[in-house]
């Protein structure tokens, strides 16, 4: 009996290794469809037809070369909701990615948001009065440059972060080239559309993973972290996903929503959900 259990464990581990190697190769050798959006900015998209995590996946990546000195901006509405594309158009931006979590009924962020040194929103704790899983990391803008900060365990950590704009979000996926710790909560382990930011060598990736469709299964955060690791990310952070996941561009060869937002339950570019904030890439 003991030998049988050992054999079953060995077979299970062997299968996991084989699948991981297959998925890793699928990501690394993918022939991405590419479109130049602006100097130093490229849109990359690929449909993995059943060959990534034994599922069909559709990933959109806006690849931004950091040496081109591109500037980011935080856009927000304190008490209302608008679609991500509207945030981009109002600012005459080059691109817009939906931001962090928000109050569906009343508008505004449910996480700490500081813009221009002014606190716009405070954290709303979970039902058990603890810090929510998406309040343990943040993206920070300092003179338009983007970085990631991680909760240090103190109650008012976010208020001491330096930077012009701060928006809490998460969970963190990759930190210092290593996987960040994720618990097994349903939010992390179930597949959904996902929005994320990753830092890879000298580039920043704004990422939309489609889901809730026969054309795209969506990913768990464990799967998304693997994708970023295989792409070589040294830092990556999750943003609000699900029906909110939207990537919009106003480029040379592509204009409009480039992924497939799921709120209208159709495989098109029209299903945007209204959100409270967005990360913008400005035109030079």
Image (spheres, rainbow, N blue to C red):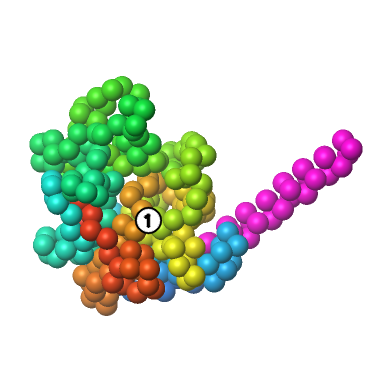
Residue 51 horizontal side relative to residue 243, left or right? right
- Farthest residue to the bottom: give it: 253
Residue at 35 percent of width and 39 percent of height: 134
- Quarter assignment of residue 156: top left
Q: What secondary structure do most residues of the magenta stretch adopt?
A: helix
Measured as percent of width and height from the top left, residue 100 is found at: 28, 47
Q: In the picture shown, does residue 107 fall above or below 161? A: below
Q: In the picture shown, does residue 85 fall above or below 121? A: below
Residue at 33 percent of width and 68 percent of height: 264
Q: Secondary structure at mark 1?
A: helix
Query: In the picture, which quadrant includes the N terminus?
Result: top right
Measured as percent of width and height from the top left, residue 161 is found at: 22, 31
Residue 67 horizontal side relative to residue 224, left or right? left
Reply yes or no: does residue 13 show up in magenta: yes
Residue 205 in view, yes or no: no
Residue at 54 percent of width and 71 percent of height: 49
Nearest the viewer among 265 and 83 is 265
Residue 105 in view, yes or no: yes
Range of residues picked out in magenta? 1-29
Reply yes or no: does residue 20 show up in magenta: yes
Measured as percent of width and height from the top left, residue 114 is found at: 16, 38
- Farthest residue to the top: give it: 154
- Quarter assignment of residue 270: bottom left
Instruction: Name the residue beneath numbered marker 1.
Output: 242
Nearest the viewer among 96 and 81 is 81
Q: Residues within 10 Å of mark 1 (few under 14, many from 20)?
A: many
Residue at 44 percent of width and 63 percent of height: 212
Residue 148 horizontal side relative to residue 113, left or right? right
Query: In the picture, which quadrant includes the C terminus?
Result: bottom left
- Quarter assignment of residue 250: bottom left
């Amino acid at each position: 009996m003991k030998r049988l259990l050992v054999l079953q464990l060995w077979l299970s581990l062997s299968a996991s290794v084989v699948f991981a190697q297959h998925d890793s190769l699928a990501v690394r050798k993918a022939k991405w469809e590419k479109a130049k959006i602006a100097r130093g900015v490229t849109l990359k998209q690929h449909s993995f037809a059943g060959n990534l995590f034994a599922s069909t996946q559709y990933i959109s990546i806006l690849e931004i070369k950091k040496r081109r000195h591109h500037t980011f901006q935080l856009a927000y509405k304190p008490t209302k909701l608008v679609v991500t594309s509207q945030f981009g158009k109002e600012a005459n931006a080059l691109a817009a990615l939906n931001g962090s979590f928000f109050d569906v009924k009343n508008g505004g962020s449910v996480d700490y948001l500081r813009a221009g040194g002014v606190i716009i929103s405070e954290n709303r704790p979970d039902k058990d009065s603890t810090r929510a899983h998406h309040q343990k990391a943040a993206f920070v803008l300092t003179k338009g440059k983007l970085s990631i900060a991680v909760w240090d365990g103190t109650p008012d950590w976010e208020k001491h972060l330096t930077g012009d704009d701060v928006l809490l979000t998460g969970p963190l996926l990759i930190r210092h080239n290593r996987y960040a710790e994720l618990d097994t909560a349903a939010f992390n382990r179930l597949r959904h559309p996902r929005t994320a930011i990753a830092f890879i060598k000298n580039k920043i990736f704004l990422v939309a993973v489609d889901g809730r469709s026969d054309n795209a299964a969506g990913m768990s955060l464990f799967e998304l972290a693997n994708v970023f690791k295989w792409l070589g990310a040294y830092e990556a952070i999750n943003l609000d996903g699900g029906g909110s996941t939207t990537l919009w561009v106003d480029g040379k060869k592509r204009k409009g929503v480039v992924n497939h937002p799921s709120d209208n339950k159709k495989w098109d570019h029209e299903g945007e959900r209204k959100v409270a904030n967005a990360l913008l890439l400005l035109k030079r």
